[in-house]
Amino acid sequence: MNQEERYVKPFQIYGNLYYVGDSWVCVHIVDTGEGLLMFDAGNCGATAMLVQSIWEMGFNPADVKWIILSHGHADHFGAVNFFKRMFDTKIYMGEPDVKMFHENPELALIQESGNCMDELFDVDVAIKEGDVLTFGNTEIEFHLVPGHTKGCIACFFDVTDRNEKKRVGYYGGFGFNTLQADYLKEIGDAAFEARKEYHQSLASVRDQKVDIFMGNHTANVDLLNKRRYMLEHPGENPFIDSEAWKKYLDEKEKELKEFEQA
């Protein structure tokens, strides 16, 4: 599939939280009042489409001051180098994945981008467990949730709509593709520690209070169907769901156990 075939018209999720990603890889923007904070940077080859979506949403791409990466896989950092070079955007990523970039860059899957000119980048801030960082008017609490990658992050923050406030939860990577037995043995994890870490990670953040579950792939939160529902039912917002976070993390825990038994 061509990247352009994944185009999704950008839209406002709630208050100062917006969606500018495509039909597969999520990209979100928070208007912090002092610049734009972007979560992930799209797939490799999708930079132009991402920039266009930011314009369409009514923002200037040059105002993206910070990018937080969910984890260090190529399908989530496609536009990072563009934003760093053009706008001096500061890049944030989990500390273990920063280490991976330096010691085992092949694990970033950059070789799967399809473009020999794509390359890794220097990260400005390595996120550590328990960090609380401020971006304009937005304070974010970070946790490391290894499993999908060592440096996968989860984070929690508030978004506002006039006088109302909702808490957002973001879990940076649910895929089991990096938990396959052959893959783990190949990278030296013969004891399958990554699977154990995944279980622990899900449990560590499961009971966080979350009003809006923000996915890093659209399937995580059924984003396309929720957007369709919003358009068909003006005034209703299916993204506001205080049960979605716990429900999905419980589903992944169940699926992980089934995956291990298969």
Image (cartoon, grey):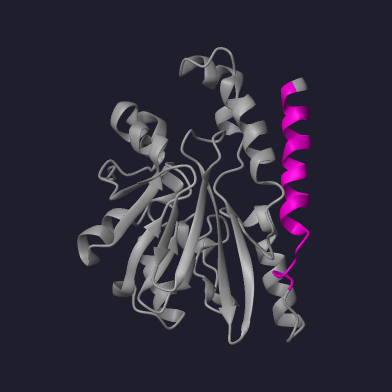
The foreground one among 67 and 112 is 67
Q: Looking at the picture, does residue 143 appear above or below residue 257?
A: below
The image position of residue 255, as x and y in percent, is 75, 35
Most common secondary structure along the magenta stretch: helix
The foreground one among 112 and 10 is 10
Which residue is pictured at 44% across the width and 41% down the height? 73
In terms of image quadrants, where is residue 50?
A: bottom left
In terms of image quadrants, where is residue 212?
A: bottom right
Which residue is pictured at 64% across the width and 72% down the height? 166
The image position of residue 144, as x and y in percent, is 51, 41
The foreground one among 1 and 137 is 137
The image position of residue 148, as x and y in percent, is 55, 36
Which residue is pictured at 38% across the width and 54% down the height? 45
Q: Which residues are magenta?
A: 238-260
Q: Looking at the picture, does residue 206 appear above or below residue 9?
A: above
Name the side, left or right, on which 51 lies relative to 190.
Answer: left
